[in-house]
Amino acid sequence: MKNPVVDQDLCTGCETCVSLCPDVFEMQGDKAFAANPGKCDACDCQEAMDTCPVEAIKWE
């Protein structure tokens, strides 16, 4: 199963992914990360990926 991963070099800290999928994404300092990648069924991770303004979220 693939999990969402936030590229820390690309992330601008806009918090869009956190707003769309708070069960999966959290902020750590000024960057987002996938704190609970296994919970993608609880929200729409693909929408978070598609909405990310810098395309920092990928499946791995």
Image: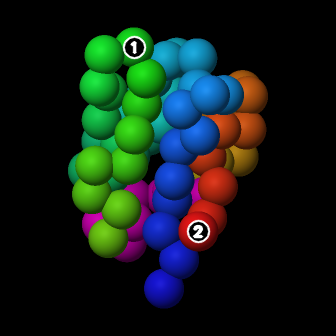
Going by the numbered disc 1, the residue's amino acid type is Asp
Q: Position of residue 20 (x, y in %)?
A: 44, 40
**Which color scheme did the rendering employ for the protein?**
rainbow
Left or right, residue 25 beside residue 16? left
Q: Is residue 41 magenta?
A: yes
Left or right, residue 19 beside residue 47? left
The magenta segment: 39-46
* Residue 60: assigned label: 2
Residue ID at (62%, 28%): 9
In this view, the residue in front, 31 or 20, is: 31
In the picture, the quarter occupied by the C terminus is: bottom right
Going by the numbered disc 2, the residue's amino acid type is Glu
Q: Residue 22: which quarter of the image?
A: top left
In this view, the residue in front, 7 or 54, is: 7
* Callout 2 crowding tier (Cα within 10 Å): few <14, some 14–19, many ≥20: few
Residue ID at (66%, 28%): 10
